[in-house]
């Protein structure tokens, strides 16, 4: 596989930073996760992307936005998947001039206390990824079957695509806007956990610098996991599609 392209030297430290938090039935978690994010750095703003949660998450987000100017809400009519929610959030943030954009779960599996480490790393990188496996296995409260699935998926993705990451399926990430501007978001195909692999692969193929930092991942306490067999199937075939597209020079 050909080496990724080279890109110009990155700009300085970002000042306008958006944390995109997709939600579906996160009414219990949202009132706690948003303040925990905002207190990490005064530059941070939060965009809640709610997919029509029937438990009232969207209404709670609106109430928070009404009292906190650093919180915004993007309502979508139906549950369309994690990848579509993030793409909508990326477009919203790019249109409004944010210089760095985070992906982050609403359920505290991604600890907001790690955000300052991302902000330090993004000074010298284009895409910073929180890795559960960079310094061993840093996952708490997962059953062994789920852990083995995750480890196998990451090894599989690395071997097939060549993507130089220990954790390509993780969803705690920070992009510089230049990365999202270079990637044609309309061409992103995946929607589940394969979305994380595809976005990192596209950034890497464009020549952007990827940097992993170790995080500790906690399984959610409230709510239900969004994992499904369909998501696993998508990830299995998507890595082969990415490799083929790269070989054909389309990525």
Image (tube, rainbow, N blue to C red):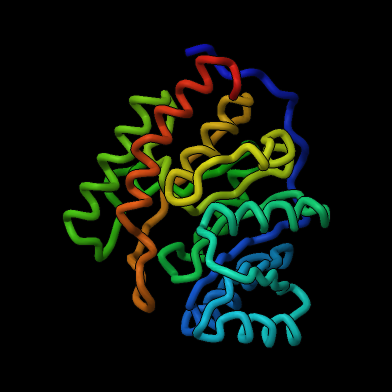
- Looking at the image, residue 34 sits to the left or right of residue 177; the answer is left
* Residue farthest toward the left in the current orientation of the protein: 144
| Residue plotted at (37% across, 37% down) | 166
The residue lying toward the viewer, choosing from 18 and 240, is 240
| Residue plotted at (50% across, 54% down) | 172
- Looking at the image, residue 142 sits to the left or right of residue 15; the answer is left
**Which of the 4 image quarters holds residue 142?**
bottom left
Q: Position of residue 139 (x, y in %)?
A: 30, 57
| Residue plotted at (23% across, 55% down) | 146
**Which of the 4 image quarters holds residue 243?**
top left
The residue lying toward the viewer, choosing from 99 and 190, is 190
Q: How many discs mark residues in the rendered view?
A: 0
| Residue plotted at (33% across, 58% down) | 228
* Residue farthest toward the top in the current orientation of the protein: 2
Q: Position of residue 51 (x, y in %)?
A: 58, 70
Q: Position of residue 169 (x, y in %)?
A: 41, 45
Q: Quadrant of the C terminus?
A: top right
129 vs 105: above or below: above
- Looking at the image, residue 169 sits to the left or right of residue 65; the answer is left
Q: Position of residue 214 (x, y in %)?
A: 42, 48
**Which of the 4 image quarters holds residue 125?**
top right
């Amino acid at each position: 596989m050909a080496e990724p392209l080279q890109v110009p030297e990155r700009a300085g430290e970002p000042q306008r930073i958006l944390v995109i938090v997709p939600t579906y039935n996160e009414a219990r978690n949202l009132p706690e996760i948003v303040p925990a994010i905002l207190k990490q750095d005064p530059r941070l703003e939060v965009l809640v992307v709610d997919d029509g949660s029937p438990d009232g998450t969207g209404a709670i987000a609106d109430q928070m936005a009404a009292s906190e100017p650093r919180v915004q809400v993007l309502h979508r009519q139906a549950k369309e998947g994690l990848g579509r929610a993030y793409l909508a959030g990326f477009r919203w943030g790019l249109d409004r001039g944010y210089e760095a954009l985070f992906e982050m779960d609403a359920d505290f599996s991604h600890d907001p206390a790690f955000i300052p480490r991302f902000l330090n790393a993004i000074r010298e990188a284009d895409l910073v990824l929180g890795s559960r496996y960079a310094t061993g296995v840093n996952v708490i409260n997962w059953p062994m079957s789920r852990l083995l699935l995750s480890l196998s998926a990451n090894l599989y993705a690395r071997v097939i695509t060549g993507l130089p990451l220990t954790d390509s399926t993780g969803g705690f990430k920070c992009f510089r806007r230049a990365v999202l501007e270079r990637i044609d978001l309309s061409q992103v195909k995946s929607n589940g956990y394969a979305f994380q692999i595809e976005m990192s692969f596209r950034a890497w193929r464009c020549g952007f610098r990827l940097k992993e930092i170790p995080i500790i991942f906690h399984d959610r306490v409230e709510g239900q996991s969004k994992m499904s067999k369909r998501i696993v199937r998508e990830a299995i075939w998507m890595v082969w599609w990415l490799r083929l597209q790269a070989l054909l020079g389309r990525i």
